[in-house]
Every structure is written in C-alpha cells, then in structure tokens.
Amino acid sequence: MLRPHPDPAHGLAPHQVLTVVQMRGAEQALIDAGDTVDSLMQRAGHGAGDWVFRMAAGRPVTVLCGPGNNGGDGYVIAQHLAARGVPVQVIAALPPRTPAAIAARAAFGGAIHDGMAVSPPGAQVFVDCLFGSGLARPIDDELYAMLTTIALQHTYRIAIDVPSGVESDSGANLNPALAYDLTLALGAWKHAHYAMPAAASMGVLRLVDIGCGAMPGAAQVLYAPKIAAPAADAHKYRRGLLAVVGGAMPGAAVLATLAARHAGAGYVKLLAGTDPGAVPPDLVVQRDGDAGFALALADARVAAVLVGPGLGRDAQARTRLAVALGAGVPTVVDADALMLLRPGQAAAGVALVLTPHEGELAPLERAFGLNSAGQKRDRAARLADASGAVVVAKGPDTVIAAPDGRIMVAPRATPWLSVAGTGDVLAGIIASRLAVLRDPWRAAAEGVWLHAEAARRAGPAFAASDLAQWVQEAVRALV
C-alpha cells in the first residue's frame, strides 16, 4: 500500500494533484520565473534518473523514448545513468519532435537504437518514456506492440510520469494495461496516479520535485494526519458522545460502534432499533420507542450521530432518519440512509458527511437532481455542492469532496478491504472523529486514513470485525 508524504513540508506543493492543464500552468509559472523548458527537462530527468539509478542497483537499463518531451526526459535519464556507470541502452521509438527533446537526444552522446530493437541479453530494468501525461487517444498498434514487446523482456519496469497509454486526467487505460513496479510522477501528482483503473497497474508511486508551486483549485492527496491526545482535563463527554442509530439489521450498527470505540470518541451509544444481541460491556445500548429515540438525540451532550448501517429502508427507517437529521447534530449518513436521503431533510447548517460507494452514488445523484457524468471526483464535487455535505465517494480510489470545492484523493489501500462490513467500520471511524473534532472535512480525511491504516496492520483475509479491532493501532501510529 502506498503511504505517501508523511512530511507536508517536503517540496513546495508535494500534495497537489494536477490536471494536464494545471500542470502546464505550473510549468509556465516556473518558466516565467526564469526557468526554460530545457532546464525543467534536465531537472526532471536527473531527478527521475536518481530514482532509476537506485532501483537498477547496477543492473542494465533500457530506456524507450517517444517523440515528445516525455521522450526528452528519457534521454536525460539515460545520460544520468551513463554518467554514473550504469549500463544503459536507448531505443527511440520515433525521432524527437520538440526542441527540448531534440536537444536532450543530442546531449546524450551514447548509442541510440532507432525503431524496433530487441533488448540485449541481460537487460533487466525497463524505463517507459514513450508517452507521458497529455495523451488523449490510444497508442497505435505498431507502437503499442513495440512497447509491450520490449517491456515484457525486462523483470523490473518503471514508468515516467504516467505509463504510456494512460489518460492522465481520468485514469482511463487507452490501451491494455501493462504492469509497472514503479511510477515516477514528474513535478506533481496526476489524477491517474490515484484513479482506477490505471492506478492499479502503476506499482509504487514516487514524486520527482521540480519546484512547482501550489496551483489554485488543485486537488490534494490525503496524507497521514496528526491526531492529538485528549486534553489533560478531558472527560467522556468532552471527548465526544457519538450516537449510532440502529435499525432493522443490528449487526452493521454494532460493527460501526466497534470501530468508533477505538477511533477517539469518549462515549459511544447505540440507539438500537432491534435487539443487537451480545455487545461489549462498555457499549451502552438504549432501546426505547420513538419518543425515547427522539429524546436521546435531543441530549445536548451528543456531539455527532451516525445513521445508516443496518437501518433498513421501511417506514420506521425513514422516521428514524428524519429524526436523526432533524436533531441539529453533526451527522454521518451511510448505507441504507443514503438511499432514503432527500434534499432539505437535514436541519439548516448541520454538518453532514455522506459516504456512498459506487452503487449508492448514482441514486444519491438522482435524488439531488444530478447526472452521473464525468470523473468520480467531478461527481463527488457536484454532490457536495448540491447537498452541502462533505462527500466520501469510497472505493478502491476514494475521493473526498467538500461543498467549498476542495477535493482530496486517497492513496491506494489494500484490496483486502473488499469484504462485507468494512464500509460500516469506515462510517464508525469517521463518525467517531466527527464527535471529537466537530469538523466534517477533517473527520472524513482522518477516518479514511485510519481505515486504510487499520487494514494495512490487519494483514490479509480479515473480517470486518477483525478490522475494527485494529483501529486502535492505527490511531496509535498517528498520536
């Protein structure tokens, strides 16, 4: 699992995720400040070359160069490796066509194989500099065959910026995906580094900093938060009372409470709709009629509410959702509640977090009069704007969107999370953090990180109840 950038002070803007247009703007800002295309290519190529040098560890390297500036980066990488004594051969798939790439090829000085060439015996590391970000159509069959033939002759494969054949802004595979061991982002992260399906084939991600400044409106990558210990005079209510609304299927709500108990809230109470069965002795379970349920949520000490896991979708579920949303308390809306939610249900000004997976996102969009067009981040942003809620569009490429336009993309987490109940665990973690922080954006970000970190520590083949027990260790790592 990628765990990027624990140090937000690294570089100038190490967490931003740029579109192709934004990246061009960032490069132009550097040029306006005195750089040139050639100097930026040298900086990127030598920075990437240092990574390739370390990964090659003396093994022979093949660099495949395309006609544009990504190919120019390849010539600089090859020059860097040759200067450090690494055996390197360059294959030019097509002649360079940009001034900077032409100059970089001329500066290389070593042998260049034009057109289709077979890697010599013993070549082990492949560097893909055929096409980088900005590609909008599939690579033609002949070039793609060249790429795959050469790449598959090597045991270790590195992509420069993005793998050739990937659309940078969407993460779409324009050609059948090749598996890479390492992808080196040049200057800034691109959306394809975090968006499926392309992200699944990129291997480990590393950033080559070329000095790009922060771009207005850029998305950000989620990085490890710092979680503060409770204040010296803290007590259970000051740390946050979380009310979890149970319903027809109590198991999901209990899972959420198991996770919430370990994520920082001082007090977790299950407002059970049905008998939850055996529960931990420190979990308070309240079973009352409708009047008692409303009274429990009216308690001024309640800091946050979680509604949805196991709620059901019948008339009683609708009533319980309406009461929860009308309580005027920061609320996480998950699972069944997302399918019942309608515009205007929440009390005015109440902080909300919505946590849809793909199957829940489309019905939510319809409920709020939205279409499902565009990238996942665009859909999440529109829903956040329409609902006034922070939206956690969860999945293997989770996106967090805020009503004010902020976008955060999460690093890839372990695919072992693809098991029933882990969404309930995530909802419990986010709700617990919301009870502590009262800030829906921070609660969502910290919750998504803790969920992935707990899964990493849990190892393979866990159940959702196992995952909940690892949340404490995930918090411990961030305190």
Image (cartoon, rainbow, N blue to C red):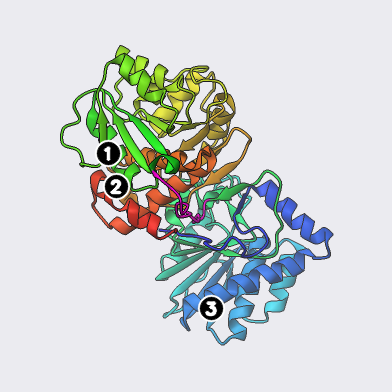
Q: Is residue 192 above or below residue 275?
A: below
Q: Main secondary structure of the magenta part?
A: loop
* Residue 114 within the segment the image draws in magenta: no
Q: Indicate the position of residue 326 as horizontal and vertical percent values.
A: 46, 19
Q: Is residue 314 visible?
A: no
Q: Secondary structure at mark 1?
A: helix
Crowdedness near tag 3: few (<14), some (14–19) or many (≥20) residues, C-alpha within 10 Å: many
Q: Amino acid at mark 3?
A: Phe
Q: Residue at x 65, y 61 (%)?
A: 187
Give the labeled residue for mark 1: 255
Viewer-nearest of discs 3 and 1:
1
**How much space separates mark 2 and mark 3, taking CA atoms?**
41 Å
Q: Nearer the viewer, residue 206 or 82?
A: 206
Q: Amino acid at mark 2?
A: Ala
Please give the label number shown on residue 53: 3
Q: How many marks?
A: 3
- Tag 2–tag 1 contact (CB < 8 Å): yes
Viewer-nearest of discs 2 and 3:
2
Q: Secondary structure at mark 3?
A: helix
Which of disc 3 and disc 2 is earlier in sequence? 3
**How much space separates mark 3 and mark 1, taking CA atoms?**
47 Å
Q: Is residue 368 above or below residue 82?
A: above
Q: Indicate the position of residue 152 as horizontal and vertical percent values.
A: 41, 65
Give the labeled residue for mark 2: 468
Q: Amino acid at mark 1?
A: Leu
Q: Indicate the position of residue 311 as horizontal and vertical percent values.
A: 30, 24
Q: Nearer the viewer, residue 33 or 339?
A: 339
Q: Residue at x 80, y 60 (%)?
A: 31
* Residue 224 within the segment the image draws in magenta: yes
Which of disc 1 and disc 3 is earlier in sequence? 3
